[in-house]
């Protein structure tokens, strides 16, 4: 049987439309993947930032509680702790320095009494 030109044109255009629909689906899937990835990156960045902030606050209050404990009367000891942990600085300034130290992987001194003494 002979196919006429009109049928071939329709058949070719259907193939083209089918391929075009597949391309649109691929683009849509790529867009969804990018959107999902961006959401996850933003979520993990916010979670990391909250974790760093909580660690800063907990560690700062722990050291302040340790320093203000009534059983410790050594002025030199207290002064060294204040210097090592930056407790004499305002909270916002200490927090900014802490963030810089975290991103440069300089975590500062530990809470070891032998280190401070």
Image (spheres, rainbow, N blue to C red):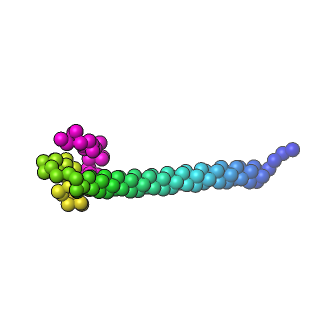
Q: Nearer the viewer, residue 11 or 101?
A: 101
Quadrant of residue 65 in the image?
bottom left
Q: How many marks do you count on the picture? A: 0
Residue 27, percent across and down? Answer: 56, 52
**Which residue sits furthest left?**
76
**Which residue sits furthest top?**
114
Residue at 34% in and 52% down: 55
**Which residue sits furthest right?**
1
Q: Tell me if 6 is positioned left or right of 59 in this view.
A: right
Residue 21, percent across and down? Answer: 65, 54
Q: Tell me if 106 is positioned left or right of 27 in this view.
A: left
Could you tell me which quadrant the C terminus lies in?
top left
Q: Tell me if 55 is positioned left or right of 43 in this view.
A: left
Residue 114, percent across and down? Answer: 22, 39
Quadrant of residue 42 in the image?
bottom left
* The magenta segment: 97-117
Residue 80, percent across and down? Answer: 16, 47
- The answer to whether residue 56 shows anywhere in this view is no
**Which residue sits furthest front?**
71
Residue at 19% in and 42% down: 116
Residue at 87% in and 44% down: 1
Q: Is residue 73 above or below residue 107?
A: below
Q: Nearer the viewer, residue 86 or 31?
A: 86
Q: Nearer the viewer, residue 98 or 37?
A: 98
- The answer to whether residue 28 shows anywhere in this view is yes
Residue at 15% in and 49% down: 74
Q: Examine the structure image and report whether residue 49 is included in the region drawn in magenta.
A: no
């Amino acid at each position: 049987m002979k196919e006429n030109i009109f049928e071939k044109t329709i058949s070719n255009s259907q193939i083209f439309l089918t391929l075009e629909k597949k391309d649109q689906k691929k683009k849509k899937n790529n867009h969804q993947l990018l959107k999902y990835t961006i959401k996850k990156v933003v979520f993990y960045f916010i979670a990391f930032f909250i974790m760093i902030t909580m660690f800063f606050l907990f560690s700062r209050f722990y050291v302040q509680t340790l320093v203000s404990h009534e059983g410790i009367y050594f002025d030199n000891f207290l002064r060294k702790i204040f210097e090592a942990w930056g407790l004499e600085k305002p909270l916002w300034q200490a927090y900014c320095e802490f963030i810089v130290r975290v991103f440069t992987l300089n975590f500062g001194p530990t809470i070891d009494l032998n280190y401070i003494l």
